[in-house]
Each structure stands twice: as structure tokens, then as C-alpha cells.
């Protein structure tokens, strides 16, 4: 599983170093795609296959389903770790996520999220200030 929060720098070629503790799970390759809240998602090939099967099963006749499938699948790209444990983030994904020099890599159990560090800081502050309300809504779902 992926857990933890790490600060890294995007190099001049658009590569980031994947945290050492995540590399083994991604050693067989990974998929990077547009995420929600203007971050990027990275999935191991195994987790990607599980998600992709769910996405293609969504009803084609519903506009929201089509839009979400396009967001996730059309923007997806295979990535491989290089010998230094880095992955290359394509230009269009760096632009989508507004990635600058400093980025945050967040492990979220079955995926990794890549954030512009300033956006991550703002998102966390907003979420933390609403944590009581969020917890209450989740309790309604049995969590």
C-alpha cells in the first residue's frame, strides 16, 4: 500500500523521483493520469486494471460517465521507473496539475497523488478546517 507524504523537486526534464518505499510496488510499471482536484494519480498496473474495468462498465449513455471516463482514460500514460527511481511526467499532465519545481507526493493506499506543493498546502488547509463536517458526513455512510 502507498501511505505518506513526501516533498520532491521536478527536474528540468519533467521527471520526479518516486519515494523509495513506493518503488517496489511500481517496479512492474505504472500508469499516470489526470486525477481529481487538479492533481495526478499514479496506479500500479494491477490497481489500474481494477479501476479501468470499473470505468469501462459505466453507462455510455450518461454524459457524466462519458466525461469521467475520458478524464481518466484519455489522459493516461504508461510510465517506467528509470535506474534512479524516477518517472517522466508528460507535458500535458504537468500542465493539467500546474506542477512547478516543488511537488508533493502523497500515498493514498492504492494510488499515489502528485500535487503542486502550493496547491497541496492550500487543499490540506481547507480540508483540515472542515474535518469535523467531513467526519460527520462520513459517519452517515457508516465510516
Image: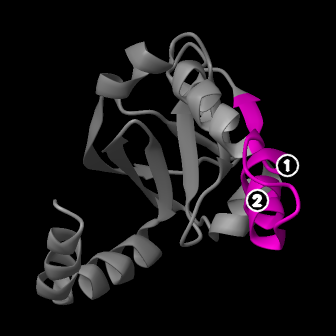
Q: Residues within 10 Å of mark 2 (few under 14, many from 20)?
A: some
Would residue 94 appear left or right of 9 to someone viewing this image?
right
Residue 82, given in percent of the width and then of the height, sits at 61, 18
Q: Write the residue at 59% across / 66% down.
A: 100
Give above or below for 18 relative to 115: above
Is residue 13 in sight in this rendering?
no
Residue 65 is covered by the magenta coloring: yes
Residue situated in front as seen by the camera: 125 or 118: 125
Query: What residue is disc 2 on?
Result: 71
Residue situated in front as seen by the camera: 62 or 21: 62
Q: Quadrant of residue 111?
A: top left
In the image, the segment drawn in magenta is 56-78
Residue 1, given in percent of the width and then of the height, sits at 30, 28
Quadrant in which the C terminus appears: bottom left
Residue situated in front as seen by the camera: 65 or 72: 65
Query: What residue is disc 1 on?
Result: 74
**CA separation in Å, label 1 and label 2:** 6 Å
Residue 25 is covered by the magenta coloring: no
> Mark 1 near mark 2, Cβ–Cβ under 8 Å?
yes
Residue 64, given in percent of the width and then of the height, sits at 75, 71
Number of dots carrying numbers: 2
Q: Write the residue at 82% across / 67% down.
A: 62
Amino acid at each position: 500500500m502507498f501511505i505518506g507524504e513526501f516533498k520532491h523537486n521536478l527536474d528540468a526534464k519533467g521527471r520526479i523521483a518516486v519515494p523509495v518505499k513506493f518503488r517496489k510496488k511500481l517496479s512492474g510499471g505504472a500508469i499516470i493520469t489526470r486525477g481529481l482536484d487538479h492533481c495526478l494519480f499514479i496506479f500500479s498496473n494491477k490497481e489500474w486494471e481494477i479501476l479501468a474495468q470499473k470505468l469501462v462498465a459505466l453507462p455510455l449513455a450518461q454524459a457524466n460517465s462519458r466525461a469521467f471516463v475520458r478524464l481518466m482514460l484519455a489522459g493516461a500514460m504508461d510510465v517506467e521507473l528509470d535506474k534512479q527511481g524516477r518517472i517522466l511526467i508528460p507535458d500535458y499532465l504537468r500542465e493539467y496539475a500546474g506542477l512547478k519545481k516543488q511537488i508533493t507526493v502523497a500515498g493514498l493506499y492504492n494510488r499515489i497523488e502528485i500535487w503542486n506543493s502550493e496547491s497541496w498546502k492550500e487543499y490540506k488547509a481547507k480540508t483540515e478546517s472542515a474535518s469535523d463536517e467531513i467526519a460527520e458526513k462520513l459517519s452517515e455512510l457508516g465510516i
